Image (cartoon, rainbow, N blue to C red):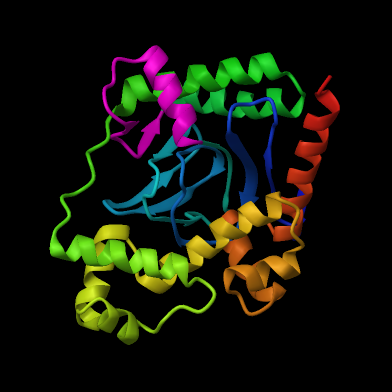
């Protein structure tokens, strides 16, 4: 486990024989996750304490035996709900992995997702922790089967087709174009005033439209996007100091501060786990 002080610890890794799914097991006390979103799904089983998760519909409190389910690109926060913090085991299956499981095991049409964010389901929570245990022990068959069983269970009990993207009104269109500009100019983004002028709107109108579309203001979204791109570069083996400049952070400590807040582990620990995963995958090849 990566050391994170006397009370906090975390391991964020990927088992190369599990289909496109990241794993995080951790205990946090003081750590808080700022507003951010993931490209895939979040399935978190709380094993101790209480986690408070801030979602668009409000805050939920998850205790032992609870499972938190978050769909792709949904902005959320997380923090301890009690002084002793919380411990959990989390799966981050990709959109493609969930779609494949849904197609083979459920009758859901369209893009499958979760219509509930929190469920007290000790059996599903135990399955999630067992995926972790089997992956950590190197049992690929058991880990893969358990992943499919728990995703199927959660989709059947708490799932449904995700609503289609909102109709592109003027406000939504402006927010989407603003996002495209921020992605393209990540290392040197415009000010809010300049961005609004480029989009032929006002700063406050742009801010409102962006919040409505992405669940957070542009600068918060940009930080999350920078960290997401940093993860890809770290996985490719780019040194953290180079990654910082490549995604628009001023230096490595700046990257480290935001990366740890959003991902839950420091960039160096994240990269070491990925390097270990890829080394093991290469060694398994005939």
Residue 214 location, quadrant: bottom left
Residue 36 location, quadrant: bottom left
Residue sitting at x 27%, y 35%: 162
Residue sitting at x 63%, y 61%: 260
Count of numbered tags: 0
Q: Nearer the viewer, residue 173 or 276?
A: 173
* 35 in the magenta segment: no
Q: Is residue 145 above or below residue 15?
A: above
Q: Is residue 160 above or below residue 246?
A: above
Q: Nearer the viewer, residue 41 or 243?
A: 243
Residue sitting at x 36%, y 24%: 155
Q: Is residue 68 left or right of residue 59?
A: right
Whole-percent x and y of residue 164? 22, 40
Q: Is residue 285 visible?
A: yes
Residue 76 location, quadrant: bottom left
Magenta segment range?
Answer: 94-120
Whole-percent x and y of residue 245? 65, 73
Whole-percent x and y of residue 252? 71, 73
Q: Is residue 242 left or right of residue 125?
A: right
Whole-percent x and y of residue 114? 33, 33
Q: Nearer the viewer, residue 56 or 144?
A: 144
Q: Is residue 33 visible?
A: no
Q: Nearer the viewer, residue 122 or 180?
A: 180
* 108 in the magenta segment: yes
Q: Is residue 183 left or right of residue 276?
A: left
- Quadrant where the image shows the N terminus: top right
Residue sitting at x 55%, y 24%: 126
- Quadrant where the image shows the C terminus: top right
Q: Is residue 167 above or below residue 93?
A: below
């Amino acid at each position: 486990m990566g050391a994170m002080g006397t009370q906090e610890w975390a391991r964020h890794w990927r088992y190369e024989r599990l289909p496109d799914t990241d794993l995080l097991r951790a205990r946090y006390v003081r750590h808080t996750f700022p507003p951010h979103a993931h490209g895939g799904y979040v399935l978190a089983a709380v094993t101790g304490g209480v986690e408070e998760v801030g979602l668009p519909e409000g805050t939920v409190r998850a205790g032992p035996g609870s499972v938190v389910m978050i769909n792709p690109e949904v902005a959320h926060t997380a923090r301890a709900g009690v002084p002793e913090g919380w411990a959990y085991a989390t799966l981050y299956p990709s959109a493609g992995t969930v779609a494949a499981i849904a197609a083979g095991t459920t009758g859901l049409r369209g893009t499958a997702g979760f219509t509930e964010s929190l469920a007290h389901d000790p059996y599903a929570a135990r399955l999630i922790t067992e995926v972790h245990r089997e992956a950590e022990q190197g049992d690929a068959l058991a880990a893969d089967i358990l992943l499919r069983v728990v995703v199927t269970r959660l989709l059947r009990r708490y799932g449904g087709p995700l609503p289609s993207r909102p109709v592109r009104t003027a406000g939504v269109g402006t927010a989407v174009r603003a996002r495209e500009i921020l992605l393209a100019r990540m290392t040197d983004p415009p000010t809010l005033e300049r961005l609004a002028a480029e989009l032929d709107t006002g700063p406050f109108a742009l801010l409102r439209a962006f919040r409505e579309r992405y669940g957070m203001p542009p600068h918060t979204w940009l930080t999350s996007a920078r960290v997401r791109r940093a993860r890809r570069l770290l996985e490719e083996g780019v040194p953290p100091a180079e990654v910082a400049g490549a995604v628009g952070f001023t230096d490595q400590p700046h990257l480290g501060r935001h990366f740890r807040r959003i991902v839950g582990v420091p960039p160096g620990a994240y990269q070491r786990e990925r390097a270990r995963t890829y080394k093991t995958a290469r060694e398994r090849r005939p």
